[in-house]
Amino acid sequence: MNTASTNAQATATELQDLLTSFQGQFLPWIAKADHDDSKVLDHYSAQDLKPKLALSCPEKPCGKDALLEILSNTLRYSANTWNPGFMDKLFASTNPIGVISELLLAVLNTNGHVFHVSPVLTLMELETSKAMAQLFGYSGEHCGGLTLPGGSQSNTLSIVTARTTLYPETKENGCGKYQFVMFTSKHGHYSVEKAAIMLGLGRNSVVPIDIDGSGRIKPDSLEKAVLEAKADGKTPFYVNATAGTTVFGSFDPFTEISAICKRHNLWMHIDGSWGGGVAFSNKYKHLLTGSHLADSITINPHKMLGVPLQCSFLLAPDSRIFQQANSLKAGYLFHGDNEGFDLGDSTMGCGRRPDAVKMFLGWNWYGREGYEQRVNHAYEMAGLLATKIAKSPKFTLVSSNPPPCLQVCFYYHSDSQASREDSKVNTKTTRRIASALDHQGRFLVDYAPGPHGEFFRAVLNSPNQNEATLDELVNSIEKLAGQANGH
């Protein structure tokens, strides 16, 4: 059946048929990810891929065979993030319970904005956000938070909440007489600038702060910038510290930043979208020292913890602050009979996907210790790759060893290269080899700009990676570089 079903029994039968058919495709696709000859992705340009897919939106039902062909092609031409060679971005594959959690959400197909349409999911979100907040050192009765559609949205809501909390009149009257200023690391995520544009503050309201040799905010530079803004008649109100910067994975000095924020009545936020997952590891949670001093924290479990995309939490020592700052008491939706449980009232939106369920089910299936093992393994792999790179005369390690987070940054140098600091040569070499890796298909590795040109950035975030994976990556880079040089 591929028309609108007439009753629940028919719907269930149709679903069972489709699930049975599709699992015959996606289970082998997952299983082959770690085969020696498997590829992360077959490289095609958009122009070449489009005719292979022959996509269309038909007037009449396509039929089961045609649907299965669409599903098969989707798998065939998509990046297989279950493959250990996927090192391109700050996420990897999910896991079995992650797939089940997405299926549960699709079956329920409900909205997480008010309690009475999602009672169980709401309580799961409150329980999960409280437990997660406690991992960061929050201990109050009302510590916790809520989920948002991605780290950028979590960061943005933290800014809105900060402005309204510190300057309540702005909720009704806008910025008015204030020329607000925010501060973030030069290596901080661009979402802070995007938020400034969205909120009418303008990109120039974000002041980038100098970093030290480890990629961390310099506290003295931060305080100097705050004082300069005040002297110019501006109103500093928000500092974005980072737990795991996008390129180098650096963790800012949270305790020192908090002291500055307290002296100047600034809201301190920690963007832990990437590195916040270390809160689950007893071995690495020291990187978050001082996080309990923050006014709010973002963490994306869909990154380091392998929860399905997307899943982002905004946490606070008192989660009630989000409703206090953002509620409009819309009577047609929020009736006041579930005060504190209608989570949509705490956001700047309405409809909400109950993404916390994915983290809740994963936490129950693996336990905190399971996530700790995942994080520790990833750090072990990152340190191992950094050591291999540092020992090879063909490479220059850009990251520290061990790296502060799970990305390893490095240059490859050809034998004929006169200077290892030649930016143009380094960029050309990096891009050429990255393209060759992409076409080969065994690895997807990204690159980023640095002081001596663009360098490789390999992200070690998959539980399927091992030392053999790392050796193959290094050997592949050397081999492809040699082929390009005619060796």
Image: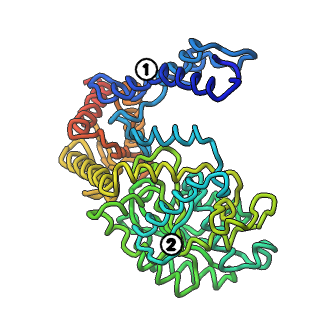
192 or 4, which is in the foreground? 4
Residue 96 image point, x, y percent: 39, 38
Q: Residue 283: image x %, image y %?
A: 26, 63
Looking at the rendering, in which quadrant would you find the N terminus? top right
Q: Amino acid under label 1?
A: Gly
Residue found 43% across the figure and 20% down from its top: 24
Label 2 to label 1: alpha-carbon separation: 44 Å
Camera-side residue: 444 or 143? Answer: 143
Residue positioned 76% across, 58% down in the render: 333
Judge left or right: residue 365 versus residue 20.
Answer: left
Q: Measured along the vertical axis of the image, is residue 464 above or below residue 29?
A: below
- Which residue is at 64% across, 61% downward? 343
Residue 47's spot in the image, x, y percent? 59, 21
The residue lying furthest to the bottom in this view is 263
* 367 vs 89: above or below: below
Q: Which residue is mark 2?
A: 143
Is 165 left, or right, of 478 in this rendering?
right
State the residue position of label 1: 24
Q: How far across and how far down the image is residue 452, in percent? A: 39, 51
